[in-house]
Image (spheres, coloured by chain):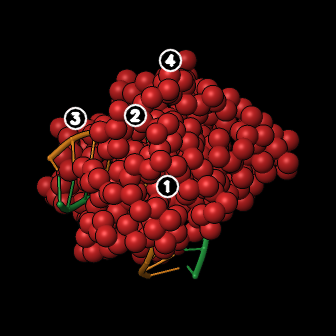
Chain colours: A red, B orange, C green
Amino acid sequence: MNVPPLGVGACTRCDNGAMSVTVPAATQRKTEIIPPAELTAFQTQLLTWFAGAKRDLDWRRTRDPYRVWISEIMLQQTRVAAVLPYYRRFLKRFPTIDALARARLDAVLRSWAGLGYYSRARNLHRAAKQIVARHDGEFPRRIEEALALPGIGHYTAAAVLSIAYGEPHAVLDGNVARVLARLGAIRGDLRRPKRWQDLAAAANALLPEQAVPAAGAPTTEAGDWNQAMMELGATLCTPRAPQCDACPVARWCRAHALGIALHLPAPRHKPKPIRLTLSAAVLLDRRGRTLLLRQKTDHSSLFSRLWHFPAIQAPKSAPKKLARYLKSVFGITAALEPLPPARHTVTFRRILLTPFLVRVAKLPPPKLTGVRRVRTPRLAEIERLPISSATRKIAAAALAVSPESHRGTAEATREPYG
DNA sequence: AAATCGGGGGG
DNA sequence: CCCCCAGATTT
């Protein structure tokens, strides 16, 4: 099969008679990944493969719009394996939109703790309230209304509406974009807004028409189509080592024909990583209690605006600077006992966490600390508060060396989502 | 158009 | 280590 690359070079398919005269060649090149005459065969091939190869995932066992929505938010920039345990716990804790809307934000954040991108949880909570207030507690079926909800962009709106309601919207995510880039041998940065729009149009052009499937035949619903495209990208058409031998649509793939599948799409532009060190103090009194803050500081965003230990930023591990900070803010003069460092990343920042254990007779009374948002939970129980992984890593280092921190914490092992 | 937001699995 | 992942929002 003759499969010339799209976007660059000549298009040998543009001379196929009078029908294409009215279509601008430039538009056609960007939108037409599969020749129209072969579209049905392509769709059948992919859907048949998907019917047999799809992974059994929790969110594929339901079409409840709420559950589909939760799964799609969690899956944003996050791998399936990481999402699964969170998805199960979250739905156990918040089984309905109503339950989510009624919950406190911190309860939602606590269920999200460790998953990252915490604005997702904040927007999820806001959107649940809006759905209860404006949509009678039902996830909207119209795409304009879905897009108006916080945290829902084009991908998530198309995903939820197609999977839950069968509405004909094509999704475009990283997987689909990579599949399209290889099918069409599209070079260049896919994330440029203009290019992404073209890819969205191309994805829509591939979407099967709604039709009643014959008995036993693969369904042609948009939700299955979208999931089939994403499944292909997630399992076979992977970024590093595409398995073209097993690909059900390899015969339509221009990148495969050219032997450049491995080199597409072009790598994403990445900002240069910034390295920094955060020295944190794990205060610990005789009863195993510690002190956490939740205030706006220079580095509070590095803790995702969640509860965190008192900390200072410096070029490298800085116990003296941390000691000065503890004295000036809390009046603490106790010794600092170094703990094993831990690594943490926030987007492009690579953080070296250098924690110190500070044993004190008494924790500073919250009212005298000069900071409003202070709590003194047991160190072994801080996961009852919304914390980021950075705080969890610091706590783990302290728990490993301080027997007293475990004293009297028989309840600490109980379900943290109580 | 560019910057920002987490965290982890796999090469 | 480096890469990128079922993206959205803000500037």
Which SS class for mark 1? Answer: loop
Give the chain letter at badge 1.
A
At 78% from the left edge and 48% from the top edge, which residue is drawn? A129
Q: CA distance from mark 4 to mark 3?
A: 24 Å
Question: Image check: A402 left or right of A203?
Answer: left
Residue position marked by numbered label 3 in the rendering: A246
Amino acid type, mark 1: His
Q: Earlier in the sequence, mark 1 or mark 2?
A: 1
Residue position marked by numbered label 4 in the rendering: A216
Q: CA distance from mark 1 to mark 2?
A: 21 Å
The image shows residue A292 at horizontal and vertical percentages of: 53, 53
**Can residue A397 be seen?**
yes
Give the answer, above or below, for where A166 lies relative to A393.
above
**Badge 4 and badge 1 in a common chain:** yes
Which SS class for mark 2? Answer: helix
**Badge 2 and badge 4 in a common chain:** yes
The image shows residue A23 at horizontal and vertical percentages of: 50, 71
Question: Image check: A270 left or right of A369?
Answer: left
Q: Quick one: A372 or A72, which is closer to the camera?
A: A372
Residue position marked by numbered label 2 in the rendering: A404
Give the answer, above or below, for where A30 lies relative to A160.
below
Judge depth for marks 3 and 1 and give the one in front: 1
